[in-house]
Image: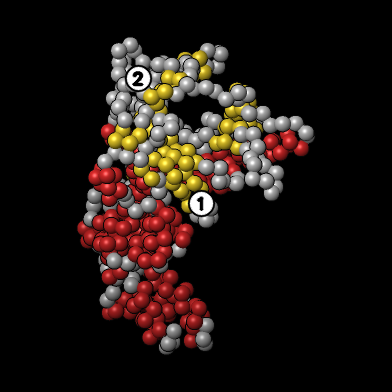
Amino acid sequence: MTTFGEPPNTHVCPTCLGLPGALPVLNERAVRFAVRAALALGCAIERTSRFARKNYFYPDLPKGYQISQFDEPFSRRGCLVLESGRSARITRVHMEEDAGKNLHGASGTSRVDFNRSGVPLVEIVGEPDLRSGEEAAEYLRALREILLFLGVNDGNLEEGSFRCDANVSIRPAGSDVLGTRVELKNINSFRFVQKAIEHELARQSDVLDSGAEVAAETRGWDEERGVTFSLRSKETAQDYRYFPEPDLPPLVLSEALVAEIRAELPELPRAKRARYVAEYNLSVETARVLTIHPRVAELFERATARHGDASRVANFVVSEVMRDVVLRGIAADVPVSAEQIADLLDLVASGAISGKQGKEVYAKIRGTARAPGDLVRELGMAQVSDAAALEPIVRRVVEANPKQAAQVRSGKTGVMGYFVGLVMRETKGSANPKLVNELLAKILGSSS
């Protein structure tokens, strides 16, 4: 097991270093995660698949080959539908092992960190169905959130646990034949992926307009200058000399295992958003915020199940709680529990405390396990709903503001809000607003 940020070459073993006599062993958990991802993307699962050796030389590949799947992957033919309606076909989802990481120093020296060498990877290969940098970024965001809700990836581009290589080519209008493909590598944000593709599309167009030909190559992205730059040429197709991995037997996935993994699939974020809109009558934007992370969606659903009013829970989570939520990949720091939210909103709905007081209670219970009801009793924050206690306060406020009182009596009912605000200030927000309005209407002789 390896963790990002650990000192170089401190999480290594004879197998990942490619030492003589060390043999690979298939990781069962990685297989289950890979099948999860493939099923969520609608792929057909092959009952039998095989591993192969992809042979090439690079300093971060100690064995001189990478264990991957080539002509017999475990899944094929999936699809990812974007919010824009674009259907992006998935060619295949296959498993392979990670390589090490080359570290280049300012002095021109390079070193290799083998911590992640041999770590299981899932590679998702797509068909050329995306038409712009914007669509590519949307595709990656949709893919990331699916993997996040599946619990198989933390979606961190900066740390390299979620990576993308973008292949870019253009074609004349009306033609079905794509031009020369250029691969973009080492891009660590969705925004930069979009910008890099947009720049590359413009660069290739300029090359063709000048009468030259686009070179087959691998290019990087310079985020400071906003341009792609050549890394290495691909003048000839690299011969990886694939051949079957002799140290790993074929991967056989039984129908029972695939059915078990399929039954474990959670509701995916796109379907969850659609359900929130249809079932709870939430806005699309509110549903989007609530499905930004599986922990946030879980918090909302559990609080709704306990409190009952989905709209009130959604508004409170989005407007109050989300400001204090810290997302950390698959994990998340949420300052309150679903039970605390539901109990707090119960107090507001029952009239025990006002909405303003509810926000004050939240500010005091976040980051703690305290029950909202206990805090309300301890601080004497119960909302004043006793007409006998409130009426003298309301009369005093009205008598102190004769000009505004006359305006209300003359029909300017909008001034009522002025009096409500004064009463709430006098009672430090503890007065029941509905009762205050009723007393004001009675005292001012208004039906408003």
Q: Is residue 352 above or below residue 128?
A: below
Q: Residue at x 65, y 37 (%)?
A: 179
Q: Residue at x 52, y 17 (%)?
A: 105
Q: Which residue is mark 2?
A: 16
Q: Position of residue 206 (x, y in %)?
A: 73, 36
In this picture, residue 135 sits left or right of residue 368:
right
| Rendered image: mark on residue 364 | none
- Amino acid type of the residue tagged 2 in the rendering: Cys
Q: Nearer the viewer, residue 201 or 324?
A: 201
Q: Nearer the viewer, residue 304 or 395?
A: 304
Locate residue 43: give its quadrant: top left
Q: Position of residue 405 (x, y in %)?
A: 47, 82
Question: Label 2: how many residues lie within 10 Å, few (<14), some (14-19) or many (20+)?
Answer: many
Q: Position of residue 123 (x, y in %)?
A: 43, 35
Mark count:
2
- Nearer-N-terminus badge (1/2): 2
- Amino acid type of the residue tagged 1 in the rendering: Ser
- Label 2: element kind: loop
